[in-house]
Image (cartoon, rainbow, N blue to C red):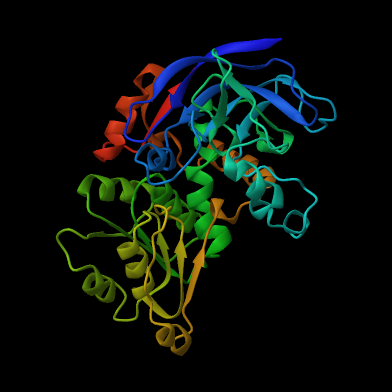
């Protein structure tokens, strides 16, 4: 038996997504769960695919930021049951490999082999088109459709009173940004934190720095609108890179010292280098933004060693989704982080291309599809 539903399908770069009828099995394979999606965020990572900056197999259902309800569970599933509210994780973990048991599940061996290649853990696809073509699911999730089949560890149970539109964003932007500040950078109350880029990830990095009690949070962007949004989410100081000399302003705001933590949330060589260049001695720059394939940066290794600077990457906010997703939802429900103001546009699946056009133009923070 199969389920037939509409999904937004990617077929080639620089072409609109097409809403097509697709099918998947109605009975989950062992170790997997069938989830009925209720909401999906439209993320910049999906735009990387549409713009041809990331090479992926096609046809593919895009989307990786989703929340919904467990429809049914496969044999051997023990942590979920029908009716559970879940947020989906694009780094499902095997819970057995070296990285999982040492507390770094986002680096799981199975993720690098299969989910990163948009497949299930058995190396296969789950969705087919009406013409019986295999259809890939972005990051193994494919949330631009009403149903998805995912490994048990890719569906994280959360409290049922959290709204789906906000909960969906915990599946990517919130965890990536907040985690970059708290888990990767390990921001301390004595730190001055710089965040470059005030999109979904950057605004949540600001929230993470605020949650950690950073003494000062500097936001940098080209858009005055986004900078004002950054102030709402906790930034204490703003730099418009288009009108001000970025390096001079950082020095001015830090009495010539630089920042202890810089978080790059855009994914451009010049902003990664700028984040690194803004550090105080002993500081840490965190790359949380996703770059296009093949991008390289240049740094001075003598300065790195002489000043004990660190340049590190942050994948999914160095999170442990099993623990961090419910925690972030609790923070939201208890008014310690703001997810409501992240959702600036609620749309149907048919409006997906309009949402990407708004993203290209820098309008709003997050469009969320509801089913």
Depth check: 200 or 312 in front? 312
Left or right side of 349 for 94: right
Image height of 78 relative to 263, above or below: above
Depth check: 126 or 281 in front? 126
Left or right side of 46 for 153: right
- Number of marks: 0
- Residue 107 visible within the image: yes
Left or right side of 16 for 65: right
Res 132 quadrant in image: top right
Rendering coords of residue 344 (x, y %) = 35, 31
Res 333 quadrant in image: top right
Question: Furthest-left residue in view?
Answer: 243
Depth check: 49 or 334 in front? 49
- Residue 336 visible within the image: no
Rendering coords of residue 345 (x, y %) = 35, 27
Question: Furthest-right residue in view?
Answer: 76
Rendering coords of residue 273 (x, y %) = 35, 69
Image height of 195 relative to 226, above or below: below
Rendering coords of residue 219 (x, y %) = 32, 58
For the N terminus, give its image quadrant.
top right
Residue at 54% across / 47% down in the picture? 175
Left or right side of 217 for 336: right
Residue at 59% across / 45% down in the picture? 116
């Amino acid at each position: 038996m199969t389920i037939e539903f509409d999904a937004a399908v990617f077929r080639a770069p620089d072409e609109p997504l097409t809403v097509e009828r697709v099918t998947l099995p109605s009975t989950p394979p062992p170790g997997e769960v069938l989830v009925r999606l209720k909401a999906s965020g439209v993320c910049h990572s999906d735009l990387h695919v549409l713009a041809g900056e990331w090479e992926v197999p096609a046809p593919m259902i895009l989307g990786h930021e989703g929340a919904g309800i467990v429809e049914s569970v496969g044999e051997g599933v023990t942590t979920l049951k029908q009716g559970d509210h879940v947020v989906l994780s694009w780094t499902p973990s095997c819970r057995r490999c070296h990285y999982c048991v040492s507390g770094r599940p986002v680096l799981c061996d199975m993720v690098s082999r299969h989910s990163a290649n948009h497949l299930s853990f058995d190396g296969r696809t789950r969705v087919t088109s009406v013409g019986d073509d295999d259809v890939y699911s972005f990051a193994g999730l494919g949330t631009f459709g009403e149903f998805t089949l995912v490994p048990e560890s890719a569906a994280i149970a959360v409290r049922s009173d959290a709204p789906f539109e906000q909960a969906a964003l915990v599946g990517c932007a919130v965890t990536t940004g907040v985690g970059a500040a708290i888990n990767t950078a390990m921001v301390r109350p004595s730190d001055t934190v710089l965040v470059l880029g005030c999109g979904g990830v950057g605004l949540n990095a600001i929230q993470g720095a605020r949650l950690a009690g950073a003494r000062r949070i500097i936001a940098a962007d080209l858009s005055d609108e986004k900078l004002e949004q950054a102030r709402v989410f906790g930034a204490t100081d703003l730099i418009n890179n288009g009108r001000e000399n970025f390096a001079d302003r950082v020095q001015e705001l830090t009495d010539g010292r630089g920042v202890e933590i810089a978080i790059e949330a855009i994914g451009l060589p010049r902003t990664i280098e700028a984040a690194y260049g803004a550090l105080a001695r002993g500081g840490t720059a965190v790359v949380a933004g996703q770059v296009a394939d093949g991008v390289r940066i240049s740094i001075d290794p003598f300065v790195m060693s002489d000043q004990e600077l660190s340049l590190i990457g942050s994948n999914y906010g160095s999170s442990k989704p099993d623990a961090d997703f419910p925690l972030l939802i609790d923070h939201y429900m208890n008014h310690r982080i703001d997810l409501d103001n992240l959702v600036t546009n609620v749309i149907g699946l048919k409006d997906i291309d309009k949402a990407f056009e708004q993203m290209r133009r820098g309008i709003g923070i997050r469009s969320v599809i509801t089913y």
